[in-house]
Image (cartoon, rainbow, N blue to C red):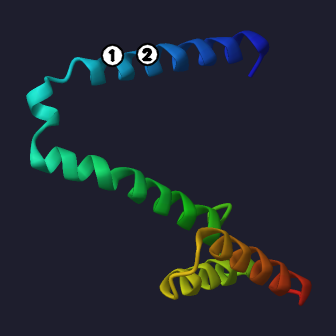
């Protein structure tokens, strides 16, 4: 893609983002106050973050992989089950991931 094509893509993306934002502002207030919409709006960020985490952890290119990243996620999940503070959860994931990689995983 040449320089002009990149700027066209950037411009189209900016227009698309603006239109998406405008669409959100045009939704009637009574629609946003429905119980189902409120519940879904609270759960949607969690679902998107979980999907992104799973994709980044278990995919390499187009293949499914189980490597040190999976061990780190398992350690974080265990720390969460034990109700550890957030920084301890992150530290557990980092230490286990680094440890498995150091051992050749």
User: In the rendering, which numbered label is found on residue 22?
Assistant: 1
Please give the name of the residue rendered at 89% of the width and 87% of the height, measured from the top-left corner: 104
Judge by depth and name the residue closer to the eye, 26 or 29: 29
Q: Position of residue 40 (x, y in %)?
A: 24, 51
In this view of the protein, can residue 95 be seen by the observer?
Answer: yes
Tell me how far mark 1 sits from mark 2, CA to CA. 6 Å
Can you tell which quarter of the image residue 20 is in?
top left
Q: Residues within 10 Å of mark 1 (few under 14, many from 20)?
A: few
The residue at 20%/46% (across/down) is 38
**44 sits to left or right of 7:** left
Q: Is residue 64 at least partly visible in the picture?
A: no
Which residue lies at the image location 62% right of the left edge and 12% below the top edge? 8
Which of the 4 image quarters holds residue 22?
top left
Name the residue furthest front. Answer: 85
Query: On residue 35, which mark appears?
Result: none
Examine the image and state in which quarter residue 98 appears. Answer: bottom right
Disc 2 target residue: 18
Tell me if mark 2 has few (under 14), some (14-19) or many (20+) residues whose alpha carbon lies within 10 angstroms of its own. Answer: few
Residue 71, image x, y percentages:
68, 84
Instruction: Say if 69 sits above or below 28 in the image.
Output: below
- Asked if labels 2 and 1 touch by Cβ distance under 8 angstroms, the answer is yes
Under circle 1, the secondary element is helix
78 vs 88, left or right, is left
């Amino acid at each position: 893609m040449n320089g002009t094509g990149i700027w066209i893509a950037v411009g189209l993306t900016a227009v698309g983002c603006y239109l998406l934002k405008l669409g959100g502002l045009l939704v009637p207030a009574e629609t946003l106050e429905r119980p189902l919409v409120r519940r879904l709006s609270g759960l949607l960020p969690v679902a998107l973050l979980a999907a992104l985490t799973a994709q980044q952890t278990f995919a390499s290119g187009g293949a499914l992989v189980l490597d040190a990243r999976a061990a780190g996620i398992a350690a974080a999940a265990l720390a969460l089950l034990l109700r550890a503070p957030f920084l301890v959860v992150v530290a557990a994931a980092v230490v286990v991931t680094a440890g498995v990689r150091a051992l050749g995983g």
